[in-house]
Amino acid sequence: MTPGLMATTPGGLLLVLAVVVPVIGILALWLVRWRAIEWVAIATLAINLVVSLATLQAVRASDASLVYLVGGWMPPLGLALRADGIAAVMMVMTGAIVAVTALYARGQFGFDPHGPERRRPMVFWTMLLAITGALNLIFVGEDLFNLYVALELLTFAAVPLVSLDGSRDTLAAALRYLVFALAGSVLYLLGVAVVYGAYGTLDLVVLAEMRGADGALLLAIALMTAGLIAKTALFPLHLWLPPAHAGAPAAASAILSALVVKGSFFLILGLWFDLLPPGLGAIGANGLGMLGAGAVIVGSVLALRQERLKLLVAYSTVAQIGYLFLVFPLATGSEAASPFASLAWTGGVLQLLAHAFAKAAMFMAAGLVYEAIGHDRIAGFKGLGRIAPITVLTMTLASVSLMGLPPSGGFSAKWLMLSAALGEGAWWWAVVILAGGLLAAGYVFRILVPAFSTPEAPAERKYPVAPVRECAALVLAVIAILIGFLPLAPWPLLAIGRIAQVSP
Amino acid sequence: MSLAPIDAATLYGLTGAVLVGIGLYGIVLHEGFIRRLLAFNLLGGGVFLLFGVIARRGAGAGFSGDPVPQALVITGVVVAFCATALAITLIERLAAEDDANDGDGSS
Amino acid sequence: MLDLALDLLITALVIGVALWTIRTRDDFAAIVGFVAYGLLLTLAWARLAAYDVALTEAAIGGGVTGVILLRASVRLKPVTTARTPIGVRVLVGLLCAVISAGLAAVVLLPVSPPPSLAADVRSHLASTGLGNPIAGVLMAYRALDTFLETVVVLLALFGAWSLTPDRAWGGRPGAPIPTASFGPLPLFGRLLIPIGVVIGIYIVWVGADAPGGKFQGATILAAMWILAMMAGLTEAPPIGRWRLRLLLAAGPIVFVAVGVAGIPLAGSFLAYPEALAKPLILLIEVALTLSIAATLGLLVAGPPETAPGTEL
């Protein structure tokens, strides 16, 4: 066993903080005075952002994973936490988006510090903190059962956000989401049982050293992947997503669409690139790629047909998730020294990042549009640019990234994936990427063209919106653009400390 | 690798495998939410039983079973209960909304 | 031989009840089937010599889950749904059969020798001061799982409370229960509750060294609390009350406090100084028992349905 992998590293305590700080925040939220809850939540998320930035810095500085053995117990008996390069990047992404969302959501949901305690702010802030902690654990967890607990935490936090409104439709959407999520969890747990029965450990690093080409492991990975796909809403298991993400309040939709679905996707990446023995995944990887391609096409076409902005944005998430799954065939088919050094690996991570920032910005903007004009019917967007210029600018920037126009994170991601596909001679994936971009252009122009037009009778702004909220959405859209200025090459940071790389 | 002996562990293991199939069938094909929830719990029972069989076969060091999978099942049962409680509350609330709407429609 | 016959009978009954639960057209019958399924699984766990799990399954898997399902069954109207086309059913059935067959193959072709952490658990158990290996796994080796599980339980309650109608926020949990101040239930309650509370505390106490533990004991305490509420002996406190919230949070707070104290005292988060391991673990277990019992009881009661101050 590589000794360096199995001992607490300097800075390892940051990983404990990433999980424990949000939990302490939740406990405090229910015990402090009502008027202080927003400050408790925002302070918690600020600390969390600092912790995640420190984690990224520590991983870069040491050029290796951070590891923490909880309770000092060594796996397989004990539980280890571990942040490699990609996990640290995910933590920073989550920390940043959640913190900006908190600024956007401050004072919302009928929060009145001087009135009586209200349901919606209590629920929103509790679940926002819980999602933060659960995602952090998903990124740093190393034990498959510990990750199961993290997945359940994420589900229990996400579902109440869908039905925060309390209307019949959102309750039905939340229930449908819960059913998919629970079915996904139990399939995942089934895979965990099979792994333990075959190997007697659930620790990913130990497993990576022991793994062989045996049927039990393949069955386990198939079951876990199926469960996680249901939670990620990959086509054709995407039906729960649009009503759930469109029905939630804008701040919650932003978190659900930008971050929550990425948690289960992150675990699939780990299973396929760290646990599956190399050379065995080609058929499966192509299968995942085909589902991804289906998602890109079907999601985009359905987005084109939506009449309401939030539903359109939600279907766009279905399509954008599809791109993520193209990483599987492209990275396994690459001739780079390891999949983590391939163009597709970096492309996939950039797609994940760019989509997270652009989509969060888009949902927040959709919420602001709703507040400005009292509805979100696309047909009624004429002249929106005059009433809400910052919000329309936000939507434009986020759309540039979603379409994949340069310069933007979305462009870089798609460019890298396109290069990978053409480099491997797999032109059919390139066709999907290009077709998806064109369809995305189609659906975003449906929003932007009326928004920029000059109407005969200008629409009127119904309600004032705090500039800080408009700026919060704008900041996220700008970040989605700025990601496009990163170099168009494999990113060494994303290969730091990958399990499959360090263990022979 | 050789065929397992026909003992209690194998018998319960096969039962767990069958229960998983039954539960999955119910989750996919039932339309009523409460029935899907029951199927989810049937499936969960099967999964836990598989853990139990692994534990039983791992008996040693003076224990009647490997304590780790047993502990995982205890955690899992509690989590499954929480999921069920949350889902039931949602189902009830949804039914209450539907009742209220029906009431509006008839008046 | 007799043992095997008994196991065959139990497995046949489990599968039969499961099939019936899936097949029956009547929702209420399905719920009854599921409760029977929980009882049979308890037997199965005892036959697998997993007594801690058997207790958990009896208390939670069959017990409280059954209660909460029955709570729903009285409120829900039967839904009649169209049958799925036979082709789809056959297809789904085949897929499920393939998965079952794969799992059966894994069961029938085990790795030998079977992997197990039993020896590892044994060799470190002394340093935790515990006699029950499962308590050792839950409170020491995998304490992070258990800590997060308590957060999951709490979050499930907050999730259930998030479904409170806005006007009822801050009210007492559950539908208003017409109190039965006379008749058999209060009498029964007065007799049974003290006994149940003693049993619950006993199960938590022995859990350190023998089958039992906080989740099982807490469930029995919760059941007694529910019984007391049904008998009109006590009322659930309003969800806005600070002391109730402190009770709910006490378990995780003590857990995290001991965990953090482990960093300077024992070198790691959730590590215990060896001399103090058992008392600290017992302290956590007591706090968790109270919190979990309260949380489970409130989950069974359901979210508030009437505005604060307007109860019966």
Image: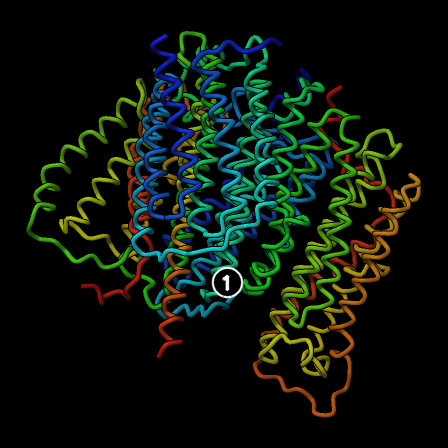
Residue at 77%, 79% in the rendered image = A452
Image mark 1: chain: A
Residue at 54%, 41% in the rendered image = A151
From the top left corner, tell me how far across and down residue A283 is, in percent.
Answer: 78, 33
Secondary structure type for disc 1: helix
Instruction: Please tell me whether residue C118 is drawn above or below residue A69 in the rendered image.
Output: above
From the top left corner, tell me how far across and down residue A7 is, in percent.
Answer: 61, 22
Pick the front one: C3 or A23: C3
Image side of residue C9 versus residue A342, left or right: left
Pick the front one: B100 or B68: B100
From the top left corner, tell me how far across and down residue C67 is, in percent.
Answer: 29, 43
How many numbered discs, if any? 1
From the top left corner, tell me how far across and down residue A183 is, in percent.
Answer: 53, 42
Image side of residue A47 versus residue C294, left or right: right
Quick check: can you spot residue A430? yes
Tag 1: amino acid: Thr
Quick check: can you spot residue C256? no
- Residue under pointer 1: A170
Q: Quadrant of the N terminus of chain C?
A: top left
Q: In which quarter of the image is the C terminus of chain C?
A: bottom left
